[in-house]
Image (cartoon, helix red, strand yellow):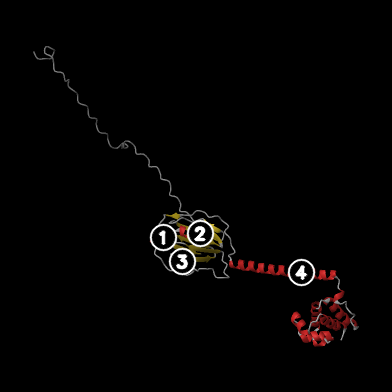
Amino acid sequence: MDTIGNMLYTERRKKGLEIVDAEQATGIRGVYLQALEQGKYEVLPGEVYVKGFIRNYGNYLELDGAHLVQLYSNSLTTGAPTPAAPPASHKTKSDNSIQRVLNKKALSTLLVAVILILSAWSLYSWQQAQPQKNITAQEKPGTQAKPISAASFPASNSSAGATATLPPGISRPVVLSARFIDRCWTSVIADGKTLYEGIPQNGETLTWDAERQIVVNFGNAGAVELTFNGQPVGKIGERGDVVVKTFTAKGLAATPVAPAAPAETTTPALPAQPPVNPSIPAAPAIPEPKTQPSTPPVPGAPGGNR
């Protein structure tokens, strides 16, 4: 029996342990533990296993496992018998305290590493589930039609392109989700293609995506709550409002407004009298009749009756 095996055997017997106890505690097969105590290293699978088993077995018996490995390595290079290592009972309190501190630090480091790995994985999973673009422009008012009732539009089934949730792995520049809390006629055009036209069910959530832009038309804007590229937009109108909005990769774009009607031209005033045509002679003036005196003649006056 070599020196290292003798120390292992002696310390195990001193602690009242059996090979079975050491096997359960270290996870090393009992046949390998007996080979270590007997110095029969050729029984073990290889050199790496010999050093690892010596270290673990020595630390389990409260010996200095690293020192035992060093002794084993020295015996291989020099071919001389390994010198005896100080038994566990000769260890100072300072050595034990240092070992406990190192063990605590190693455990703390391991826990911190596990927490960081879990946090990084959670953040990565969350980012994969969320759209990559954010709204960068403020909402601008667009053209609103005259408010009408959404009940005047007939209900229709969902068209192709409308899904309750965006399939995983798809990350397009424009993603728009709409949650309907009341009846609302809805039309959605993505990159010039009509994806949906109808009235969704109350409580239904639909999601559309596009490469360039999405144009939505809501017949009852107060019944729709929007989410654009993962960011809540909320309602874009009141109940009964008909709202048309355009969403691009840069955010909510201004909806084109119809040009204002030109100002009315002032009608020139007509002349008070029609213009005179010089080729037509003017009508002759009609003389005014002479008026007779209304007083009867006085008798005896000249020109009167005698």
Residue found farthest to the left: 306
Q: In which quarter of the image is the N terminus?
A: bottom right
**Residue type for callout 4:** Lys
Front disc: 3 or 1:
1
Q: Name the residue under label 1.
A: 150
Q: Which of marks 4 and 3 is nearer the N terminus?
A: 4
Front disc: 4 or 1:
4
**Residue type for callout 3:** Tyr
Q: Name the residue under label 4.
A: 104
Q: Do the residues labelled 3 and 1 touch (CB within 8 Å)?
A: no
Q: SS for tag 1?
A: helix
Q: Earlier in the sequence, mark 3 or mark 1?
A: 1
Viewer can see residue 45: no
Disc 2 from disc 3: Cα separation: 15 Å
Q: Are marks 4 and 3 in contact (CB under 8 Å)?
A: no
Q: Residue 108: x, y in percent?
A: 74, 68
Image point (51%, 66%), residue name = 207
Q: Which of marks 4 and 1 is nearer the N terminus?
A: 4
Q: Mark 2 points at which residue?
A: 246
Q: Name the residue under label 3.
A: 196
